[in-house]
Amino acid sequence: MTTLSTNSAERKPLIKSRALRRFLSHKLALIGTIMVLTLTFACFVGPYLLPYDELYIDLMSRFAPPGTNGHLFGTDPLGRDIAARLFHAGQISMAVGFAVMIIATCIGSVIGVISGYYGGAVSAVLMRVVDAFLSFPSVFLLLALAAFIQPGPVMIALIISATSWMEVARIVEAEVKSLRNQDFVQAAHMLGLSNRWIMFRELLPNAIGPIIVAATLTVARAILLEAYISFLGYGIQPPLPSWGNMLNGAQQYLATAPWLAIVPGVAITIAVAGFNFIGDGLRDAFDSRSDLG
Amino acid sequence: MARYLLSRLGQSLILLLIVSFIGFAVLTLAPGGPLSQFALSPGMTQEQIDKIANQMGLDRPVVVQYFDWLSHLLIGDWGTSYRDGQSVLHVIGSHLFATLLLMGTATVISVTLGSSIGIYSALRRGGAFDYTMTVFAMVALSIPTFWFGLIAIYIFSLNLGWLPAGNMYTVGDGSVLDYISHLIMPATVLALVDVAIWSRYMRTSTLNVVNQDFVRTAKAKGLTGRRVLFKHIVGNSLVPMITLAGLQLPMVLGGALVTETVFTWPGMGRLFLDSLGYSDYPVVMGLLMASAMLVLVGNLLADITVALIDPRIRLD
């Protein structure tokens, strides 16, 4: 018995695909991958190699400059080791970033696929909601929510997701709309498959390229947003460190202890730039037209 | 034209309505709520809290509260600040100028710098400059605005002493030069991200224009390179940028919020943070609405401008 493939084209396994080859030949993307991997490694292994614990308070050695007494990046106003806090904060900031990526991508995909598949009034309503969310300066909404809820890391991830899903929704909607009338979807209809099956098993997998690109860029965005709101004092609350809240008090010590501001900022920039580079590489890799240009 | 204007205006109003509902629902339903600040006062009984809720109309269903708030909003009554009893509209109005000044200056910087970089990259496509600027743009997009502000203060105020570290003017001075010296750093910091975005889009837009027939025609007519560049290429690649400027508004406004905090700039962003600190719901809600309006008006203006100057767009 033969089975009828309802996919538009035969899909090669990712490992052999042209997309992967293109990604690997993308210099910036490789640099980004190295940046992210190095940082992740440092954050998860680093704490075991350092002589100090991130919560250890030593008031005798407050504001020690980087390099003194085994303090790799110096100490903060309470004499805590900045390197230990930085790595620990990195685990939290990156975890928030990935959580947002998963949540926002799921919300965006579901809304996008429903809107693109049904079209008409459903699409009009959903896309106006997307527009409405986009016309808020998201930082304002984010801060208002964070300030009034006074959340923990999980809630922070949910709140950032609530202002980060629109991009994915738009991309998926456009993608699904263009696929909706293709033969393989008609075939699926004739086979009597349910709407839900067609949406999530037939249409969504075909939009996976742009979704992955958007998801990668969402990680970068989420790390930035978490830093913003934590810097302003409404995000992750101490004693739990995050890259953003390490910068929270840094401004007042800018003249005497500039490393307080410099170190976490560099970490944020490396992480965000890394994910942006990867996203850019993935975009080129999945874009079949990029061979021409 | 009139019909186009009306339909765009209608769409904007519907969007504003959705925005207002989302904002109101979120703020009202979030745990804590407007009453939490009273609940914190020592010796406050549940009875007294209920009485305050009753006086402020907070014990009614959310939908009723929303329509009450909305109908007052429409006749220009945006409520009064919990903090000092001033009208919300007045409080926002007194902070509007500082924010518009900052955003306006930043936009001028990012448009001129960003489009110059973009055009030059496109004309020298694949060259060293183009590649450097591609990397620069992505790094610039990855630097948190507030951190860039801190580093700028560290270098230019604390170490070099060239520029003031904060505020909009020196008390007792207030000359134009004084304003400018205070404006340079925050405006440049705020512009950085936009320079990156503008240069990328301008590059793409210029590449699209360069390959079009009318450019070839202009060259074939024997026009000088400079004339082709400025009359035919630059003008036409700027048209899609107007729409982009409108779409970028929420980001610039969000960026202004942290920039104002870092540079103690007395604008809407700092007002927003102060109001959050005081749980001043009417002002917070008013600022959410004001910022959404600013964004929608900006987009509307951008669309109209494009429609007016691009002869290919038919308005009816």
Image: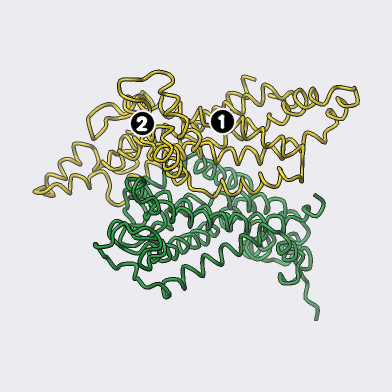
Q: Is residue A80 above or below residue B292?
A: below
Amino acid type shown at disc 2: Asn
Picture disc at residue B153: none
Is disc 2 surrounded by few (<14), some (14 to 19) or many (20+) residues within 10 Å? some
Picture disc at residue B167: 2
Q: Specify whether B264 is left or right of A291.
A: left
Locate residue B182, reporting x and y percent: 42, 29
Q: Specify whether B263 is left or right of A22.
A: left
Quarter of image, res B217: top right
Picture disc at residue B109: 1
Q: Chain of mark 1?
A: B
Q: Residue furthest bottom?
A: A1
**Which chain comes out yellow in the rendered image?**
B
Labels 1 and 2 within one chain: yes
Q: Chain of mark 2?
A: B
Q: Which sits earlier in the primary sequence, circle 1 or circle 2? A: 1
